[in-house]
């Protein structure tokens, strides 16, 4: 059978899609590039914004006709809130919890029913929910699936899944459950095998990588995953405990230990980690990054809002002062660091004064990129009970104001790279043009002529008996010749 995966949202969903693909390949199915060619469509949903859910509804309605003709099966997974599950039920043959991917494999192997649309979604769901393999929690099973990687040079590795933080606007703790970390040994071994297979870029993923805690992979049981209560860690940004017996210190040390162990793996590669939480970003981590060889000077540290009142309403557990203190430590310790962030505009109760505080942080930090979201209430989260009192027009205006501030800053900032030679990993080829990213994650458009020269030089080389037709997945030294707010331009030297 032919299948197609439509993954929306964050890198974690893209990584999950690779695990789902692996399950389908093992069951003998073939991945297609477009939904029109597929007999089975799997949607990996994102619940962060209503817009993503609306797109899924739109598509699911359009698929109904093909389903009625009996030649399409639709499956939904990813971040799906219970309320959405109830309404999506009529459009999808199966909705399964992403943590149950491994059991979906058993199901595909044992039951051909799924291919004939004679599905009883409820009984399948019961079967999938009925427990994991002996000796393993459901989430350990999930980590043990070997993903079918889309790229041959860039890979995502989940180091934890779920979240304990309960930010009031976020659905993740409800859709993915509590945080469970993957054993350190497994992660290090996966990085090692990717590096020896020639991977150049690895991204360690978790909803909050800073609270990675290798110990808890054994401590947490299925029961706790299903029913666990909120365990928000009451720490303040930039103020980390060093006490050996503190759980917070153990977690801090675990992530630092993980990056140190990964860094010892020999090879030419770079490693990013994502996402961070300001309240858990430790001094030890800041001090460790510049001492590594493979971790670039690039940090994504979500701000969400610059107003203490709004941060409290968001349940973020830090203040503007904490955030400044953290960023100052990062800038002081990690040379030439690039800092990117996430901001939500129009959160309930956000006044002009609150928004002015956000703009203040944006101006003072000078971010290298900002991913801006306009608040939209997600049912099932705590923010849905708050009055969505910022009009859409005001949200749009605030979105534009932040974008303008960023653009103005980057137009000036990116000029400093002109004339420099930067290491770039070439990661995309579109319409005859090559693009890549620097270590600090700036997009670079590479001059076509310089690429042809390199390719013909490689072809004519006595050392090469293989014709090189693409530079995708290769590191190159690129001289930056021009810049805009959103991109650098350069030529390979
Ligand atoms: S830290 Fe907050 S925003 Fe991030 S996944 Fe957890 S609850 Fe959601």
Image: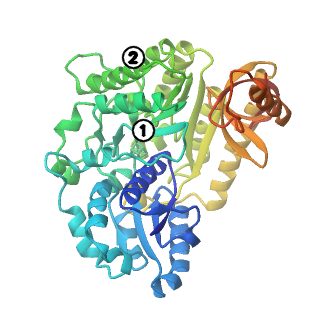
Residue depicted at x 22% and y 62%: 129
Name the quadrant containing residue 491.
top right
> Which of 104 and 14 lies nearest the eye of the viewer?
104
Per the image, the residue denoted by label 2 is 284
**Where in the figure is residue 342, as x and y percent of width and height?**
55, 41
Ligand 1 positioned in quadrant: top left
Q: How many marks?
A: 2
Q: Is residue 90 left or right of residue 109?
A: right
Q: Position of residue 443 (x, y in %)?
A: 69, 35
Some atom of ligand 1 lies within 8 Å of the CB belonging to the residue at label 2: no
Disc 1 packing (10 Å; few <14; some 14–19; many ≥20): many
Image-quadrant location for residue 284:
top left
Marks 1, 2: nearer the viewer: 1
Image point 44% across, 15% down: which residue?
288
Q: Is residue 206 visible?
A: yes
> Is ligand 1 less than 8 Å from the beta carbon at label 1?
no
Q: Indicate the quadrant containing the N terminus: top left, top right, bottom left or bottom right.
A: bottom left
On screen, 253 above or below 486? Answer: above
Q: Looking at the picture, does residue 452 appear above or below residue 169?
A: above
- Mark identifier at residue 136: none
Q: Residues within 10 Å of mark 2 (few under 14, many from 20)?
A: some
Write the residue at 60% across / 21% down: 337
Question: Residue 54 appears at what percent x and percent y?
Answer: 53, 69
Q: Nearer the viewer, residue 23 or 336?
A: 23
Measured as percent of width and height from the top left, residue 56 is found at: 51, 68
Q: State the CA–CA distance, disc 1 to disc 2.
A: 22 Å
Residue at screen point 13% across, 50% down: 134
Dot 2: element:
helix
Q: Which residue is mark 1?
A: 157
Quarter of the image containing the C terminus? top right
């Amino acid at each position: 059978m032919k299948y197609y995966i439509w993954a929306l949202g964050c890198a974690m969903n893209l990584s999950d899609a690779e695990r789902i693909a692996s399950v389908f390949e093992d069951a003998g199915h073939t991945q297609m590039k477009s939904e029109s060619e597929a007999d089975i469509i799997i949607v990996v949903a994102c619940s962060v914004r209503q817009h993503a859910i609306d797109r899924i509804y739109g598509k699911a309605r359009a698929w109904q006709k093909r389903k009625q003709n009996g030649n399409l099966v639709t499956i939904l997974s990813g971040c799906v809130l219970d309320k959405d599950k109830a309404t999506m039920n009529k459009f999808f043959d199966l909705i399964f919890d992403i943590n149950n991917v491994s059991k979906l494999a058993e199901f595909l192997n044992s039951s051909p029913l799924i291919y004939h649309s004679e599905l009883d979604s409820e009984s399948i769901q019961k079967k999938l929910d009925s427990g994991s393999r002996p000796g393993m929690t459901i989430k350990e099973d999930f980590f043990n699936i070997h993903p079918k990687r889309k790229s041959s040079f860039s890979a995502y590795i989940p180091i934890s899944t779920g979240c304990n933080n309960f930010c009031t606007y976020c659905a993740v703790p409800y859709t993915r459950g509590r945080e469970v970390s993957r054993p350190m040994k497994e992660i290090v071994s996966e990085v090692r095998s990717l590096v020896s297979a020639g991977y150049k870029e690895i991204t360690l993923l978790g909803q909050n990588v800073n609270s990675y805690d290798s110990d808890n992979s054994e401590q947490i049981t299925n029961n706790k995953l299903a029913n666990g209560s909120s365990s928000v860690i009451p720490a303040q940004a930039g103020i980390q405990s060093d006490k050996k017996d503190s759980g917070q210190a153990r977690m801090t040390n675990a992530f630092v230990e993980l990056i140190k162990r990964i860094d010892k793996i020999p090879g030419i590669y770079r490693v990013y980690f994502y996402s961070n939480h300001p309240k858990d970003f430790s001094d030890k981590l800041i001090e460790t990054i510049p001492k590594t060889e493979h971790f670039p000077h690039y940090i994504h540290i979500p701000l969400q809002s610059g107003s203490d009142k709004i941060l409290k309403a968001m349940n973020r557990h830090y203040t503007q002062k904490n955030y400044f203190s953290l960023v100052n430590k990062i800038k002081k310790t990690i040379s030439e660091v690039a800092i990117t962030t996430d901001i939500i505009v129009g959160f309930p109760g956000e006044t002009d004064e609150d928004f002015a505080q956000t703009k203040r942080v944006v101006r003072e930090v000078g971010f290298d990129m900002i991913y801006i979201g306009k608040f939209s209430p997600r049912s099932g989260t705590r923010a849905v009970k708050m009055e969505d009192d910022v009009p859409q027009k005001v949200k749009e205006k605030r979105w534009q104001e932040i974008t303008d501030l960023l653009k103005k800053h980057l137009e000036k900032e990116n000029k400093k790279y002109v004339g420099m030679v930067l290491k770039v990993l070439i990661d995309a080829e579109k319409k005859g043009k090559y693009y890549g990213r620097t270590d600090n994650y700036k997009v670079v458009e590479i001059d076509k002529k310089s690429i042809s020269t390199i390719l013909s030089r490689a072809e004519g080389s006595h050392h090469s008996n293989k014709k090189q037709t693409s530079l995708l997945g290769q590191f190159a030294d690129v001289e930056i010749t021009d810049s805009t707010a959103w991109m650098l331009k350069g030529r390979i030297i």
